[in-house]
Amino acid sequence: MLYVITGPPAGGKSSWIEARARMTDVVIDLDRIALALAGPGAPSWKHDETLLKVAHRARFAALDEAVKHRDRVDVYLIHTMPSAKARARYQRLGAEVVTVDPGQAIVMQRVRDMRDPAMTAVATRWYRQHARHARSHTITRQTSREW
């Protein structure tokens, strides 16, 4: 099965996956990919533009291969804000889309406490975009862990 995990930055998407995925499952997370490709001492979330380009290519390749095996293992893909084209592809693949959102106040506090200040704009954009799509999609409100 393919699970597409969406939600705002610092919303708990990785924690949601960690609570469910088995060690034999495939987890495709851009932050983890970028960190794996980065040099020693690289930050966990604020990635260089070149590194992000390489990580995005690796993510696309990983997804293309992983979906071929979703009948044997679960595939978890973190995609914060999928485009309409990406959502259509995930639907064709029979994905279950899960939105992890502990609420805007909690997310904004987590961003202030733990993330680069630029992530505030990303979280704000996620909530604006999500409000437009929320009318037609089911939302799973999920708290992740104690931060």
Image (spheres, rainbow, N blue to C red):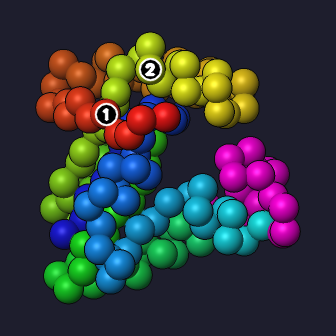
In percent of the image, x 18 and y 54: which residue is there?
Answer: 96
Left or right of 97: which side holds 84?
right
Q: Secondary structure at mark 2?
A: helix
Label total for image = 2
Residue 139, given in percent of the width and then of the height, sits at 20, 30
Tell me if residue 63 can be seen.
Answer: yes
Q: Residue furthest front?
A: 146
- Where is residue 102 drawn, in percent x and y? 34, 27
Q: Which residues are magenta?
A: 39-56
Count residues near mark 1 (Cα–Cα under 10 Å), then give few for <14, some for 14-19, many for 20+.
some
Question: Disc 1 marks which amino acid?
Answer: Thr
**Eyeballing the image, is 74 above or below 127?**
below
Q: Which residue is mark 1?
A: 143
Quarter of the image for residue 25 reads bottom left
* Residue 128 visible in the picture: no
Q: Which quarter of the rendering shows the N terminus? A: bottom left
- Magenta stretch contains residue 51: yes
Query: In the drawing, does residue 21 fall left or right of residue 59?
Result: left
Vertical placement of 116 versus 19: above or below?
A: above
Foreground of the two, 16 or 49: 16
Instruction: Tell me where residue 101 appears, x and y as whole percent.
Output: 34, 30
Residue at x-position 38% and y-position 40%: 145
Query: Badge 2, how many Cα within 10 Å: few under 14, some, many 20+?
Result: some
Q: Residue at x 51, y 75 (%)?
A: 61
Q: Dot 2 corresponds to which residue?
A: 106
Asked if the residues shown at circle 1 and circle 2 are in contact, with their CB atoms under 8 angstroms apart, the answer is: yes
Mark nearer the N terminus (1 vs 2): 2
> In the rendering, at what x and y percent does residue 64 appear?
41, 75
Looking at the picture, does residue 60 appear above or below residue 12?
Answer: below
Point 42% across, 35% down: residue = 146
Q: Secondary structure at mark 1?
A: loop
Which quadrant of the figure has residue 90? Answer: bottom left
